[in-house]
Amino acid sequence: MLSYTLRRLFQSGFVLLMMSFLVFVGVYAIGNPVELLINPQADDAERLRATIAMGLDKPFYAQYLAFLGTASTGDFGRSFVFNVPALSLILQKLPATIELALFATMIAVVVGIPLGLIAGLKPDSFVGRAIMALSIIGFSLPTFWVGLVLIMFFSVHLGWLPSNGRGDTVDVLGIPVSFLTWDGLTHLFMPAFNLALFKLSLLIRLTRSGTREALLQDYVKFARAKGLSNTRVIGVHVLKNIMIPIVTVIGLEFGSVIAFAIVTETIFAWPGTGKLLIDSINQLDRPVIVAYLLVIVSLFIFINFLVDVVYSVLDPRVRLGAQSGGGH
Amino acid sequence: MIYVHRIFTALLATVPMSLTYAVTSGAAAQTSTQAATKSAHARDISIGLQAAITSMDPHYHNVGPNNSTLRHIFQPLVAPDENQKLTPALATSWRAIDDTTWEFKLRKNVRWHDGSAFTADDVAFTLKRVPNVPNSPSSFATFTKPIIDVKIIDLHTIIFKTAFPHPLLPSDLTAVAIISKAVGEKATTDDYNSGKAAIGTGPYKFVEYVANQRVVVKANYDYWGGEEPWDKVTFKMLTSPAARVAALLSGNVEMIETVPTADISQLEKNTKFALSNKVSNRVIYAHLNQHQDKAPVFLTDKAGKALEKNPLKDLRVRKALSMAINRDAIVSRVMEGRAVAASQLLADNFFGTSRKLKPAKFDPEGAKKLLAEAGYPNGFAMTIHGPNNRYINDAAIAQTIAQFYSRIGIEVKVDTMPSSVYFTRASKLEFSYMVLGWGTESGEQGSALRSLLATYDTAKGMGVTNRGRYSNPAFDKALGEALVTMDDKKRESMIQRAAEMAMEDVGLIPLHYEVSTWATTKALKYIPRTDQYTLAMNLKLAK
């Protein structure tokens, strides 16, 4: 386990290094942030001053090495646009995104698994087919479009839910969260649902096919033959056995929910990191882009690691760090 | 599977309808409930902004959205009114004693938000700080640079010496927010963002700033200019146009700026909302690459071979390219009427615009003839470059121009890209024909001519954004003389003459002036501004 963790850490470090280099090259190739930020009336002297202020006067490799030097001490540079440390800007926005992602995942799980179960148990009924139709729609419709339709219906037409922002927040352990106030909840619901829609459809389909497969297994037939109640057969025997792939997918997808919250955050003006990233890319705010991607990649690596660990707990046949075959 | 498909198509089909429906009638119920809940705080309003405010430090980033929002807290010596005419703000009067000496009389009995008195010391300190803000990506030094010496005569009189005769000094100073010396001496940009140092003299006081999210200000009841109608103003940064409109329709904000052109006609029909608009100081134009004598890369003959001569250096070709564009069609179709066909760099009524100049008449036949005369009877091949996320409908404008050009026998490709890529490449002179925009902050055509058409010489600050590298010595001379003429009347007619020279020579192709549009609830009325600023001070109750 220890050697496994160490090896994973080493690999992660390498991934982060490569990623930072690629982003550096990419942003460098796109364009010059001075062109975007400076007042177009500025003369030579002013342009030079701004270029030096952002450290862009140095050759590319020197900029990258300087970044590596400060990054190793935890300083990812200051945002060109906001003039605040890039990392603190991201950490300030991250709770909002994580809250959104958690809430979306919760919706996906709470709604998706029962619906998938129903669709799996009664595949040919009207309800079962309607659920599958819904899941196809959830898969196919683009997020930005669904978001706008949700706003038009629930905010503009019915006036039930606010169309943008995060609402009132309360601090829990110094982190502002909105799900503890009614106002915050009303702000949270629509963007979370919009973000959840894709995962929801995924979970419906995953649960459905898992259920259908499990129903044909001998142990289910045996349980029924024993005369166990339907609830017990489904709740214990079926559900427990289909949970392993579902847990894995939820874990893996959680990272992508965070990373792909961008569209939802833009439409609902949700003050998270996704919106920050889009604005930073448009402004070529390199320190923020690099820091954001490093944080997200670290998060991915961490979640993957966690999933591996959980997996080994759930399934005793899996052993972490096993080089080849058995190894008992 | 078939019925699934049907549901899907049915859903798709209903959406355009539901959007329209929502806009025209849906908001009715919502606004009335909103009005009921709002009555408790009748004097609180929320405004949806189109761009992020990047800092609360008034000298950190010289960019329109920041300057606009910070105007609530901080004030300049001289303030532009809604037509960009200069009005007294922290200075009550100003005059040029001689060509390079200016005297400003400051307003008495003005107090900072922390209660201390405003004096000439604060002004002198501000001018010292402006060029020295660490890490500023775009400083205000451009405006203070001509001032080489500051003399404080008494508490409320200050004298500026300029390096050269600089008639635009009062206009330049409209961009420079005055800060308190006592507060500013120890303050960094972070202190302004946190509000600790955000102490101004303006009609509103700082309450809160959250990057990429909102700015909140509250009324300053001791404001020297009298009380404002609002107790608290919340500026929400809603950068997605659809989200901005939705926020207005759902009663989340009472006003938005930059209404997307596609939503204007729907909002106009909706009795719950009111629109206000005004021709802005922004012109959309095309720069033509006249840098080299050989044709630039994106301009070839139809077979793709390089041309010996650069056609864009030929006046007849430039004239043809201007005549071939039907500006009225762009205005009515692409811009949905929210633009005005342009003949120069600023709309009529701005300082230094010439009434003699009219938008080029649409004449494709005449354009063809001119091309033939210039030696291109069969036209040539050209790529039009433009941004796709910077100006209103920018990509559509480039595409429309391309269609007009194909009518006169020019083979056109269109390549539009995000501004983050576009402006870097445009400044490197990679393009032949580029669609661009320019907002004239001073409201005086001289400064636009200077930046866009004067011969490129960045050391002197001339032609700094002349991406076409147009160069005309006679025009340079006329403009150079105009820019240092202190007498307003004389200067205006000299600028007009310079503008006529450059426009008759088609130094660039003016397309249209953008019209800015604001939308408010019916209960409110916004006094629209040419500088595209969104100010709570210009927002009134409708009756």
Image (tube, grey):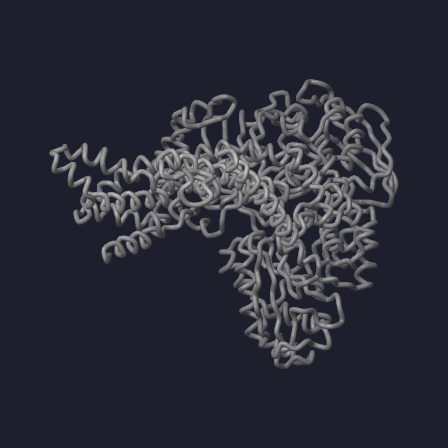
From what the image shows, is residue B430 above or below residue B541?
below
Q: Is residue B456 left or right of residue B296?
A: right
Residue B492 in the image: state x and y as whole percent.
76, 51
Q: Is residue A243 left or right of residue A67?
A: left
From what the image shows, is residue A21 above or below residue B299?
above
Q: Residue at x 39, y 50 (%)?
A: A142
Q: Quadrant of the C terminus of chain A?
A: top left
Residue B167 seen in this snapshot: yes
| Numbered disc total | 0
Front residue of B333/A311: it is A311
Q: Residue at x 64, y 65 (%)?
A: B433
Q: Is residue B468 left or right of residue B304?
A: right
Q: Residue at x 44, y 28 (%)?
A: A178
From what the image shows, is residue B310 above or below residue B97?
below
Q: Residue at x 56, y 68 (%)?
A: B402
Q: Is residue A65 left or right of residue B361?
A: right
Residue that lies at the very extreme toward the top in this rendered image = B115
Front residue of A218/B113: it is A218
Q: Quadrant of residue A326?
A: top left
Residue A160 in the image: state x and y as whole percent.
35, 34
Residue B499 in the image: state x and y as whole percent.
73, 59
Front residue of B233/B242: it is B242
Residue B307 in the image: state x and y as whole percent.
69, 76
Residue A267 seen in this snapshot: no
